[in-house]
Amino acid sequence: MPNVLNRVAKRVIRLIKVQNCDHCPYVTMNTRKIAKENNQEDIKNAIARIIKENEKYFIYEIRRTTVDHIIHGDSEILKNLGYSHAIALEIFEKYGSFIYVGDLCSYVHSPRNVKYELEKLIHIYGLERVTEEIAIYLKNNYSERFDIKMICSQ
C-alpha cells in the first residue's frame, strides 16, 4: 500500500512541476496571456466570422431569448441568478437584445463549431467582453431585426 501511495505522490509532484512551467499549455495563470499572444484573430473579426457563418442560429436564438425576456423576464430575479444572467441583463439595457452566451455555446442543438469558437473566445477575452461584442455586432449589422419599434394604433 505505501508503494502505491508513493507512486501517486510522485505523479502529483511531477504534474505540479509541469503545470508551473511557463511554456506549458496547462498553466492556469498564464493561459489568457499565452492565448492572446498566439491568437492572430481580433475578437471583433472572430465574432463577425462566427455570426456570418451561423447567421440563422444566432438570429433565431438571440431573438428568442430577447422576446422571452421582454414577455416573461423579471429583472430582479435575473440579477440574483448568476453572473451570466446579470451580464445578459446589462447588455439588454445597453443594446436592446438579451444575449445569454451560455445558451449560445451550450445549447444541445447548437452547431458544434459555434460551441467551440465561443468557448475559446470566452476563455481568452472573458464572458462579459464576448457578450458585449456580439451585441455591438448585431446592433451595427442586424439592427432591422433587433430594433424594438413601438406602433400606436387608435
Image: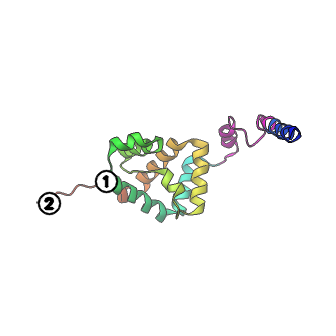
Indicate which disc residue 147 carries: none
Residue range in magenta is 16-40
Q: Position of residue 133 (x, y in %)?
A: 49, 47
Between circles 1 and 2, the one closer to the viewer is: 1
Mark 2 is on which residue type? Ser
Q: Is residue 146 left or right of residue 39?
A: left
Q: Is residue 35 left or right of residue 110?
A: right
- Comparing 141 with 12, the one in front is 12
- Crowdedness near tag 2: few (<14), some (14–19) or many (≥20) residues, C-alpha within 10 Å: few
Above/below status of 21 relative to 104: above
Report the residue at 27% width, 55% height from top: 149
Report the residue at 57% width, 46% height from top: 122
- Badge 2 marks a residue whose secondary structure is loop
Which residue does the numbered mark 1 point to in the structure image? Answer: 72
Mark 1 is on which residue type? His
- Residue 35 sits inside the magenta stretch: yes
Indicate which disc residue 153 carries: 2
Sequence order check, earlier mark of 1 and 2: 1
> Which of the image's four quarters has the N terminus?
top right
- Comparing 142 with 117, the one in front is 117
- Crowdedness near tag 1: few (<14), some (14–19) or many (≥20) residues, C-alpha within 10 Å: few
Q: Is residue 74 left or right of residue 28?
A: left
Q: Quadrant of residue 75?
A: top left
> Which of the image's four quarters has the C terminus?
bottom left
Q: Is residue 105 left or right of residue 152?
A: right
Marks counted in the figure total 2
Q: Position of residue 48 (x, y in %)?
A: 53, 55
Report the residue at 56% width, 63% height from top: 111
Q: Could you tell me how far apart the alpha carbons at marks 1 and 2 are, in whole angstroms?
A: 24 Å
